[in-house]
Image (cartoon, rainbow, N blue to C red):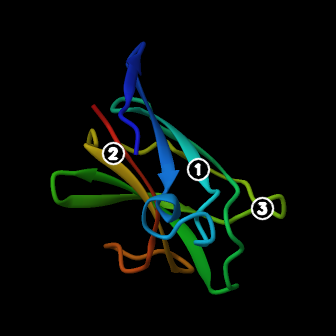
Amino acid sequence: MNGGTKRGGWTWLLLAGLGKIFGGENHPAGQARAQVYFSASRGMVLAAENLPELPPDRVYQVWAISGDSPVSAGTFQRERDGRGSLIALSQIPPPNAMAITVEPTGGVPLPTGPKYLQGLAE
């Protein structure tokens, strides 16, 4: 997990695959990573790569975490090349951390699935 840096009102975070931390390179998220650009006034942009393929009834869901309260920033699906992206223009509270979980299609109000990627803000 890497800390964020701030540039021009945007906070940049690199989300590392938790497989590298907990399960080694053979964990499904071992090679996955994502970059997030976050602005409290402009929203968030996420670009992920090396994502594992999911069953048809599952999606990746992005969470902005402030304290102990995760707020959904939206869901996205993996493309054939293992990449995924999300642009969230809604107001999201400034996060202490960001995470990506695997959830049922349509998303959920609070995380329930496995956490694949996570990164800490400053």
Q: Is residue 94 above or below residue 58?
A: above
Q: Quadrant of the C terminus?
A: top left
The residue carrying pointer 3 sits among few (fewer than 14), some (14 to 19) or many (20 or more) residues within 10 Å by Cα, namely some
Q: Quadrant of residue 59?
A: bottom right
- Residue at disc 2, secondary structure: loop
x, y percent for residue 72: 38, 60
Choose the circle earlier in sequence order: 3 or 1. Answer: 1
Circle 3: residue type: Glu
In the rendered structure, find residue 33 and report the number of the disc placed on it.
Answer: 1
In the rendered structure, find residue 19 and report the number of the disc placed on it.
Answer: none
Q: Residue at position x 28%, y 53% from top?
A: 65
Q: Which residue is mark 2?
A: 92
Q: CA distance from mark 2 to mark 3?
A: 25 Å
Q: Is residue 112 above or below residue 16?
A: below
- Residue at disc 1, secondary structure: strand
Mark 1 or 2, closer to the camera:
1
Circle 1: residue type: Arg
Q: Which residue is mark 3?
A: 79
Q: Residue at position x 83%, y 58% from top?
A: 81
x, y percent for residue 3: 35, 34
